[in-house]
Image (cartoon, rainbow, N blue to C red):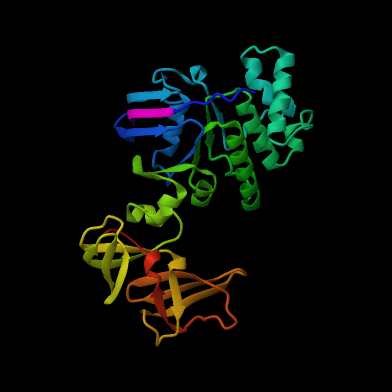
Amino acid sequence: MTKKTGSVRFESVVKKYGEVTALKKLDLSIDPGKLVTLLGPSGCGKTTTLRLIAGLEMATEGKIYIGGEDVTHLTATYRKVSMVFQSYALFPHMTVRENVAYGLTVKSAPKAEAAQKADEGLELVGLAGFGDRLPSELSGGQQQRVAVARAIVLEPEVLLLDEPLSNLDAKLRRHVREEIRQIQQSLGLTAVYVTHDQEEAMAVSDDIIVMNNAEIAQIGTPNDLYEAPSSAFIADFIGDANLVPCDVDALDGAIARARVNGQKLSVPSNGIRKGAAQMVLRPQALTLQKPDQPGLEGQISYAAYLGKEMQYTVETLVGSLFVIGPVQAQPFLRGDSVSVGIIEDQARLVSA
């Protein structure tokens, strides 16, 4: 099986449905061999973007390139892409081998060649020997792997995955996403993955394109988005975050001198300006101490033991704070008064 893979480029692409703008002017570039995830809330434009790459929708304005070729006006049939759908879309009356070979037979490949490539595809996804079974004889995870095999035997330049794990339970989702990532890396495929699940996106992606209100909010690696959010929306959407109002009094290179409810802190500036701002405090960036220690005064309204960690909600003058702490012999309990400490180098600042 060949490993030809292509880039994806949008130049000022707009998609409208009548008077409704589903995608504002979009510029993006996806390098060959990368797995990039389109992430965002419902209605943000991520699925529209995927369908534009697939050729299932036509751009209202702008240009779309795949592998350097202008495909703006080409329908799905003439684009070198394959899509994996969330519903699997397997034919129940066909064997697994016949399902995987279906796209090849539609393209008039010889029957023996299509069957051979189908078996190679099944081996790649860990289903060697399953070719004679029916889809109904497979688990949900196995059916999804059949759908992946069917897509990759067509040797696409770009593999598209539309919420591919949404029909699986949580434990199986973790397992199948690891398999999809492994297959993508071993074949060197360019892949565009759509999900609304932040953890899933962070687990599989080289880069994440976070979308909101029909446009790109931020592009970066999972680490970039978590550690250096460009806005309150990104901070709140990627992982758990407490957003606390603060004032930036001074800037000293990469350090900002900020105040939270009178408490003075030195935190990474993250390109912020002086004045009102918001401080992003991940649950692990907060510590709970006895009330006589320095910090934000608070009272625990919720406490839960989760085996490997404790989770707390603490009511303070700057709002409710979600805190994750270690399991202790004598944990804090609901109703306890506490002092909430801030680990300064883990705090981040975004515009108010």
Magenta stretch holds residue 276: no
The quarter holding residue 265 reads bottom left
Q: Could you tell whether 84 is left or right of 132 in the image?
A: left
Number of labelled discs? Answer: 0
Residue at (38% x, 24% y) in the render = 64
| Quadrant holding the N terminus | top right
x%, y% of residue 220?
41, 45
Q: Give the range drawn in magenta.
A: 8-13
Q: Could you tell whether 321 is left or right of 329 in the image?
A: left
x%, y% of residue 80?
52, 21
Residue at (74% x, 15% y) in the render = 112
* In front of the other: 8 or 304: 8
Does residue 17 show up?
no
Q: Is residue 159 above or below residue 242?
A: above
* In front of the other: 64 or 84: 64
x%, y% of residue 276?
22, 64
Residue at (73% x, 20% y) in the render = 115
x%, y% of residue 97?
73, 26
Main SS class of the magenta portion in the image: strand
Q: Could you tell whether 342 is left or right of 170 in the image?
A: left
Q: Is residue 176 above or below residue 61?
A: below
Q: Could you tell whether 325 is left or right of 168 in the image?
A: left
Residue at (47% x, 67% y) in the render = 284
| Quadrant holding the C terminus | bottom left
The quarter holding residue 109 reads top right
Q: Is residue 165 above or below residue 58?
A: below
The residue positioned farthest toward the bottom in the image shown: 292
Does residue 284 show up?
yes
